[in-house]
Amino acid sequence: MIEIFKKDWCFMRELYCKKCGKKINTKLWMVPNSCVCGVNLDEWQKDSGRTTFRYLLCIFLLMLPLFLLIYLLRILLKNLIILYALILLISMIWLRQADGILIRIGIVKMKNIIVK
């Protein structure tokens, strides 16, 4: 069953380090900041302004549900600081996951990551 599910998600490819060739372990679709060999994985290739615009547009579209949730709950956010802190934490995790999804799909190209 899991193998069938993996074959259906063909756009979610595996990530490998350019220096050592090892598979990069991602947890919850979040790409770590460095590989086991010590290479930084957080530098993305800025080919042109078009690539940057495409990246920012995709990040905005992936973060839009969270923005709408914050807009709808803005009255509660004024009264409960705990809820505000919780949504802030969720937004940071969601941003890292959206970045990982864009890397795996191939929209964002990283300097030290090979996508296969």
Image (spheres, rainbow, N blue to C red):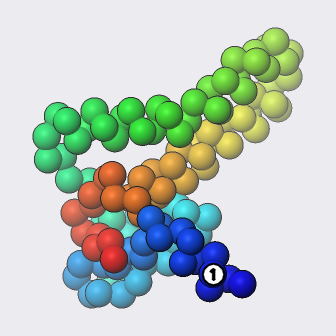
Q: Is residue 24 left or right of residue 72?
A: left
Residue in the foreground of this view, choosing between 71 and 6:
6
Q: Relative to 86, does residue 4 appear above or below in the rendering? A: below
Q: Relative to 24, does residue 55 appear above or below in the rendering? A: above
- Tell me where residue 105 sits by quadrant: bottom left
Q: Which residue is located at x 81 percent, y 12 percent? A: 75
Which residue is under mark 1? 4
Q: Which residue is located at x 42 percent, y 53 percent? A: 102
Q: Where's residue 38, x and y in %?
A: 32, 77
Q: Where's residue 21, x and y in %?
A: 29, 87
Q: Is residue 66 left or right of residue 30?
A: right
Within-10-Å neighbours for mark 1: few <14, some 14–19, many 20+: few
Q: Which residue is located at x 76 percent, y 38 percent? A: 86
Q: Quadrant of the C terminus?
A: bottom left
Q: Where's residue 80, x and y in %?
A: 85, 22
Task: Give the residue type at disc 1.
Answer: Ile
Residue in the foreground of this view, choosing between 85 and 100:
100
